[in-house]
């Protein structure tokens, strides 16, 4: 019965999420994952990794690993970067590799950026990744297919606010499985906004909202409320569609940043399991025209 439930669970979740990008709770720390216009936005060299284990304790639950790095060039007018993401759910593993480019225009009190990205996604299944009641089940077999994709995004920001609109992967992707064409991805649209209020010299309050839209599914809304203390420590709460709730903790030490997120399911969630997400990043001023005063995450 346990294996049967796992098979049903994997099938239902894969159908429900096959057309969605991986979920992130620290997208404000790694915004280039959802918008290529963030490449070079901090006027420094940035590199970060993150690991997310969703529904910890569920065999075959979603696990996501990502790496992204970007660098400001040409007197901070251009930005280039790379992205690598591996997302696994049960026997399904998707691996994305891509490059990003952004052009920045300095306005009177803000910066406008336009970004593009291009890369490939490898869709694969591995029946050995799950325990099957019937190893010869024809519904579980190994296949691999790679698809090209491209995306765009725009960004407007200054020290106070951030406004971002993007479609990180514009092309729908279909794979051939068992002689049938199956859609594994359709466009995800992201609208993100954040504003920083200065409570006093030591405390900042930064609320933010992320709207995620995919054809055929309801709009998903993340609402965040973070407090920043002495520009070093961050603590905040967030909710995703009121179906899950989370706590975010972050610490910045010179040029390094460590972040942790703990999520709990809400009353409307079908699975009563926790989620954990950790991230580590470094921000360096390696060129003479880079920002030398602050880490600029």
Image (tube, rainbow, N blue to C red):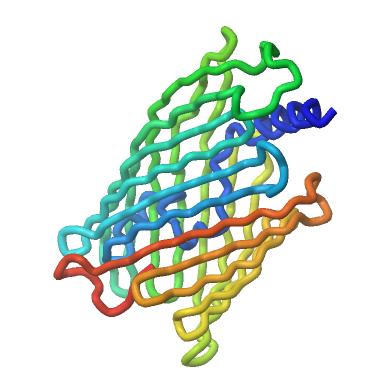
Q: Taking 220 as reference, is 111 above or below it?
A: below
Q: Residue sitting at 48 percent across and 74 percent down?
A: 251
- On screen, 33 above or below 76? above
Residue 175 appears at what percent x and percent y? 51, 19
Which quadrant, please, contains the C terminus? bottom left
165 and 150: which one is in front?
Answer: 150
Observer-nearest of 145 and 241: 145
Give the image quarter of residue 184: top right
> Residue at the spot x=63%, y=36% of the render?
17
Badge count: 0
Residue 227: % across, % down? 57, 78
Percent across and percent down for residue 116 are 33, 44
Q: Residue lying at the far top in this picture: please name it.
A: 179
**Relative image position of residue 234 (x, y in whole percent):** 53, 75
Quadrant for residue 73, please give it. Answer: bottom left
Left or right, 123 with respect to 71, comes to right
The reply, left or right, for residue 123 in relation to residue 254 is right
- The image quadrant where one finds the N terminus is top right
């Amino acid at each position: 019965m346990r294996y049967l439930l796992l098979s049903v669970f994997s099938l239902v979740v894969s159908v429900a999420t096959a057309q969605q990008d991986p979920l992130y709770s620290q997208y404000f720390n790694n915004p280039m994952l959802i918008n290529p216009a963030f490449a070079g936005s901090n006027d420094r060299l940035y590199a970060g990794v993150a690991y997310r284990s969703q529904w910890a304790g569920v065999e075959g639950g979603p696990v996501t690993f990502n790496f992204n790095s970007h660098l400001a060039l040409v007197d901070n007018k251009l930005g280039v970067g790379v992205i690598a993401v591996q997302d696994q759910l049960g026997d399904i593993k998707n691996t994305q590799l891509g490059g990003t480019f952004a052009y920045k225009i300095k306005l009177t009190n803000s910066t406008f950026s336009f970004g593009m990205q291009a890369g490939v996604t490898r869709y694969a299944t591995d029946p050995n990744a799950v325990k099957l009641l019937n190893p010869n089940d024809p519904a579980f077999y190994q296949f691999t297919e790679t698809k090209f994709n491209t995306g765009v995004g725009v960004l407007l920001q200054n020290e106070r606010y951030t406004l971002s609109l993007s479609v990180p992967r514009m092309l729908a992707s279909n794979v051939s499985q068992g002689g049938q064409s199956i859609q594994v991805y359709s466009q995800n649209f992201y609208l993100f906004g954040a504003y920083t209020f200065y409570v006093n010299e030591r405390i900042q309050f930064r609320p933010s909202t992320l709207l995620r839209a995919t054809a055929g599914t309801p709009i998903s809304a993340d609402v965040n409320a973070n407090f920043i203390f002495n520009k070093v420590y961050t603590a905040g709460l967030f909710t995703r569609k009121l179906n899950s709730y989370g706590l975010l903790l972050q610490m910045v030490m010179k040029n390094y940043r460590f972040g942790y997120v703990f999520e709990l399911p809400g009353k409307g969630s079908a699975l009563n399991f926790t989620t954990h997400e950790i991230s580590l990043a470094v921000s360096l001023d390696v060129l003479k025209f880079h920002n030398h005063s602050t880490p600029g995450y």
